[in-house]
Amino acid sequence: MTDKDREHKKAFEHEKYSADVQLLLANERTLLAWIRTGLAVVAGGIALAAFYKSSPLPGLLILILGILIALIGNRRYKMAEKSIRAGKLPASDKAAPQQLFVIAVLVLIIVILQVTLLSE
């Protein structure tokens, strides 16, 4: 192996390492965004529960929704982290449609409860 070949191999390994680090950091930033979103939703749930002291159910449901959002983000982070460390691109999350459905149903329930509470 010539010196030039060794330099090319070393440069390739450095680029691969750099790309892996970039993917890991991007994955971590995505996790932080999920957690930030979950915390914002939880804060909204607490505020709503405090505002409607006679019926805090909508606020509690929003609080649960915020926790669910953070847990989904954590699950996705772990799946991506495992794939990146194995040298593969993360697979698409097949559970995403079910997660979206559960979140949509919770939001619909919260809206219905809010409308019924406001009309009373």
Image: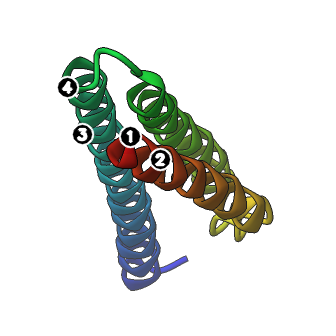
Amino acid bearing label 3: Ala
Secondary structure at badge 2 equals helix
* Residue at the image position 46 percent from the left and 82 percent from the top: 5
Depth order, front residue of 95/85? 95
| Residue depicted at 34% across the width and 58% down the height | 26
Residue at disc 1, secondary structure: loop
What's the distance in space between the residues labelled 3 and 4, CA to CA?
Answer: 16 Å
Of labels 1 and 3, earlier in sequence is 3
| Pointer 3 residue | 40
- The residue type indicated by label 4 comes to Phe
Q: Residue furthest front?
A: 120
Name the residue carrying label 1. Answer: 120
- SS at mark 4? helix
Whether residues under marks 1 and 4 lie with C-beta atoms below 8 angstroms apart, the answer is no
Tell me if residue 67 comes above or below residue 24 in the rendering: above
Mark 2 vs 1: CB contact within 8 A: yes
Residue 56 percent across, percent down from the top left: 39, 21
Give the residue number, with chain letter if any, for mark 2. Answer: 116
Q: Secondary structure at mark 3?
A: helix
Q: List x then y, in percent, for residue 76.
A: 59, 49
Disc 4 target residue: 51
Q: Residue at x 37, y 49 (%)?
A: 119
Is the residue marked by circle 3 packed among few (<14), some (14-19), or many (20+) residues within 10 Å?
Answer: some
The numbered mark, 2 or 3, whose residue comes first in the sequence reads 3
